[in-house]
């Protein structure tokens, strides 16, 4: 059974940093591109970042470019999102999602709250 | 960046109704569009990709079509479990993006 499980969310002050993790199982992790997608409370979905299967190519939404860094460790079936210079508008549930073009498996998400 | 505009933002319908949701792309995306369903407190579920290809296991009452930069999701006969929020998503090129969502209520 395919599973992706996020962790690392929490409350952080504006300007602070947080590192999210996602551990995958039930599929060959290093065969797949992975993504982070977020959803602010009561709002819609926003694609945040993607990384190809080998990590050779990385992409970001304009809203996070220069502040967030995506990475992966294929030996540990893990995906990461380092978030720096956090703003109130980054408050959201962050989902880890599998896929290069569409997202067929999603984790349950981890909540990031940016507030003083 | 490509923007997707969904209409309507919300929609009220009844069981058995035929419902259509539209997603308009700000430029041509060559059919690189997917549709997702999200129920309250749940993660999004992929329904359709490549504008009109149904994901395995998705009921045949769901269908998608494309006309230029306009894409439609049609539910032919609404069932109680279809009341949810629907999102379109393009994958023509990075950065990917989602439409703002259409909430389908009773």
Image (cartoon, rainbow, N blue to C red):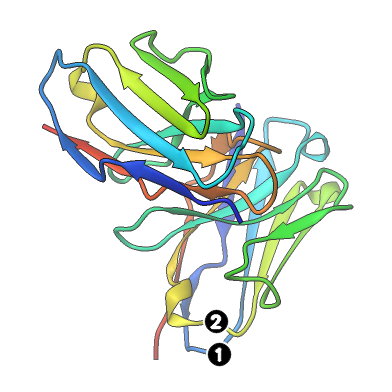
Residue B12, above or below B65: below
Q: In the displayed structure, does residue B9 sit left or right of residue A24?
A: left
Classify residue A76 as left or right of residue A22: right
Above or below, B52 relative to B8: above
Q: Please name the residue shown 63% across and 39% down the image.
A: B91
Q: Decide which of A61, B57 is in the foreground and name it.
A: A61
In the rendered image, the quadrant that contains the C terminus of chain A is bottom left
**Residue A86's disc number:** 2
At 58% across and 51% down in the image, what residue appears?
Answer: B2
Label number found at residue B10: none
Q: Secondary structure at mark 1?
A: loop
**Viewport quadrant of the N terminus of chain A:** top right
Q: Callout 2: helix, strand or loop?
A: loop
Cα distance, mark 1 to mark 2? 5 Å
| Disc number placed over residue A15 in the picture, else none | 1
Taking the spot 66% from the left edge, 77% from the top edge, the residue there is A67
In the displayed structure image, the side of residue A32 where residue B23 appears, left or right: left
- Residue positioned most to the top: B60
């Amino acid at each position: 059974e395919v599973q992706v499980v996020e962790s690392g969310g929490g409350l952080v002050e504006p300007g602070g940093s947080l590192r999210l993790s996602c551990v995958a199982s039930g599929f060959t992790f290093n065969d797949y591109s992975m993504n982070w997608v977020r959803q602010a409370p009561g709002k819609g979905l926003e694609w945040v970042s993607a990384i190809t299967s080998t990590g050779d190519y990385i992409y970001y939404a304009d809203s996070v470019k220069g502040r967030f860094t995506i990475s992966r460790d294929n030996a540990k079936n893990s995906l990461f999102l380092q978030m720096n210079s956090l703003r109130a508008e980054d408050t959201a549930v962050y989902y880890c999602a599998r896929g290069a073009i569409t997202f067929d498996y999603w984790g349950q998400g981890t909540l990031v709250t940016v507030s003083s | 960046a490509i923007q997707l505009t969904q209409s309507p933002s919300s929609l009220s319908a009844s069981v058995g109704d035929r419902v259509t949701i539209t997603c308009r792309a700000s430029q041509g995306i060559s059919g690189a569009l997917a549709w997702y369903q999200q129920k309250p407190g749940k993660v999004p579920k992929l329904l359709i990709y490549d504008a009109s290809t149904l994901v395995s296991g998705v009921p045949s009452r769901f269908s998608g079509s494309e006309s230029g930069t306009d894409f439609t999701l049609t539910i032919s006969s609404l069932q109680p479990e279809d009341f949810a929020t629907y999102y379109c998503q393009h994958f023509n090129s990075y950065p990917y993006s989602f439409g703002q969502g259409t909430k389908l209520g009773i």
